Image (cartoon, grey):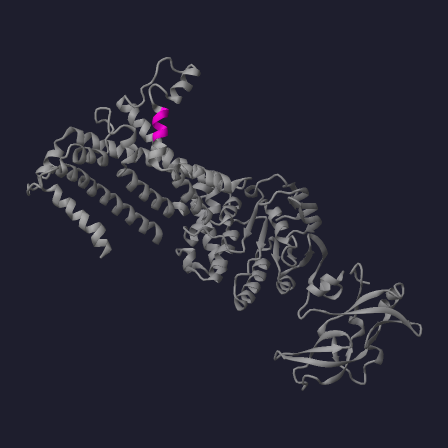
Amino acid sequence: MAEVSLHKLNKKFDTTHVVKDVDLQIRDKEFMVFVGPSGCGKTTTLRMIAGLEAITSGEIRIGNTVVNEVPPMDRDIAMVFQNYALYPHMSVASNMAFGLKMRKFEKAEIEKRINNAASILGIESLLHRKPRQLSGGQRQRVALGRAIVRDPAVFLFDEPLSNLDAKLRVQMRVELKKLHERLAVTSVYVTHDQVEAMTLGDRVVVMKDGVVQQVGEPLELYNTPANRFVAGFIGSPAMNFADVTLVENGGSPVAEAPGLRIGLPGALATRARAKTGRKASLGIRPEDIHIATAADAPEYCFEAEVEVVEQLGSEILLDMRAGGALMVASVEPTLRVRAHDKLKMALKPERLHLFDAETEAAI
Amino acid sequence: MLLGLFIAYPFFEGVKLSLSSARVGDPGHFVGLKNFHKIWNDSIFHTTMWNTFWYTGVTTVFKLALGLWLAILLNRHFRGKALVRAFILLPFIIPTVLSTFAWKWMFDPTFSVINWTLFQLGIITTRINWLGDPDLAMTSIIVINIWRGVPFFAITLLAGLQTISPELHEAAAIDGARPWQRFWHVTWPLLMPVTLVVVLFSVIQTFADFQLVYVMTGGGPANATHLFATYAYQLGIGTGLLAEGAAISLAMFPFLFIIVVVQLLYIRRVETR
């Protein structure tokens, strides 16, 4: 069991600076997910924790030890690779035994651990097969098994589900979650899939261009994103943004764009007042837009024309144009709407977000 | 049809020749296994056979070891990698006859650059007659064969190494395998199919080698460095005893056949493993 802490961690490849001053405390038994678009430095960070990539500057601690110069084998970690990295010439059992053999474990102990891991993962019947005789999902389990038998202080996962088909990915995601609850080992998990990040992580680190954008629990990121990038990256379908100007209207601040004027409520209004006259991005999630009723205050309503209707069964996504802004609204599946319908929409004022147009930080 | 014309026909003509009493200017007649009986009791043939096995065995071991070592070095990232890789192939690209002539000069008793160097370094005081002494001559030929063969091993094994995912090495490193353990447990078994094919090709070529010995020693001194091919040539073409020459070259056939079959069986086993 161990904490992992990163302090002013930097990585440069020649002239490209891929990880910039990352500071992070991963708590004992925590499931920490790194998420971000490709090239954001998340995998490089993971590989530095694993010891597969040298650190340019900064410090990594696992437990109480600074591991900057410690080789991977002595860091007490186990890693699950994107392409599984199973030894193709060894059986499933040998794959799982390899790390223990290298560490000179007793034969009986090795067997015990393999059988235990195999029963947790439901791969008892596969132990004598070669990796190439397994399906993608089975290989993934074996890779997990190889990590589990080691009983390490930290699990590292490098996009382990990205090679699986969508259905299997959902299934393995659930299993990973259960596995973590059962084993309670500190885990660091890298993914580009925000759904995986939200569902698996105790906390999530959002990275972009080598810089940590925000660290927080999934709902914290969802409800109070620190900046426009996090707001747009977390959540599906993505948050709507409209380029607006913050103006005063009869003493209260409003966000204005051609064909769109939205009032700003309470605390948001207070913060926006300081930026009156400045440009900003108004953010609202699709599920926070609905068709206006008499109960909706007029300052939170707007006119929109439906361009595309996407029937998803459980909901309907309406791609709409409101003045110059394109918006997606998620509405009740029972609603009958057709393209080119003109609708009066309303949004939940307490769910509005504002981001500075220059710094992109939340206002 | 083409196979028949260019492979089967010459082969059966060779067999026919070896069973006859043909010599230059005399088509001869069928004599059964007399030629084989004769070479079987020929002491030069015994030397030739031993030479061929020794030559093939020693060179193959060295070519594999050096080629693998070079391949592993070349598989690392360094500046000018592509250039070095191309450079490595030089001994393989130069026509054997030309490079062997160059080597002949280096081993020449009077002009030998090797002797000169050793002399200047104070290691020797008298000239070494590299190609005049039976053992030294064989060693010299072996050295040249290794020099010429290593690039082929290195480049082919390098290609094999590049098919092994670096993730496997990383996984093994995390699993606690030290560098030589990673080589032994991961690289070597995964490289095995390629290695076997390269060794197979090399053994066939080396076993039937001709140019190198022909240029360097012509089989001498005193027939001490003959291989099957050079002895067959000397008897068949040099002396005109076509039938006996044919018998000697055919004597290679069962050995090669066994080597090839054994290796192919082994390759199949490794691949289905």
Stretch of the chain drawn in magenta:
B101-106
* Residue B3 in the image, given as x and y percentages of width and height: 23, 54
How many marks the image carries: the answer is: 0
Image quadrant of residue A178?
bottom right
Of A319 and A204, the residue lying toward us = A319
Identify the residue shown where x is 54% and y is 42%. Answer: B77
Q: Is residue A278 left or right of residue B268?
A: right
* Residue A24 in the image, given as x and y percentages of width and height: 70, 50
Residue B47 lies, with reference to residue A20, above or below; the image says above
Q: Is residue B104 magenta?
A: yes
Identify the residue shown where x is 29% and y is 31%. Answer: B215
Residue B86 lies, with reference to residue A154, above or below; the image says above
Query: What kind of secondary structure does the magenta stretch mostly adopt?
Result: helix
Identify the residue shown where x is 64% and y is 53%. Answer: A42
Image quadrant of residue B14?
top left
Could you tell me which quadrant the C terminus of chain A lies in? bottom right
Q: Is residue A292 magenta?
A: no
Q: Is residue A197 left or right of residue B120?
A: right
Image quadrant of residue A303?
bottom right
* Residue B1 in the image, given as x and y percentages of width and height: 22, 57
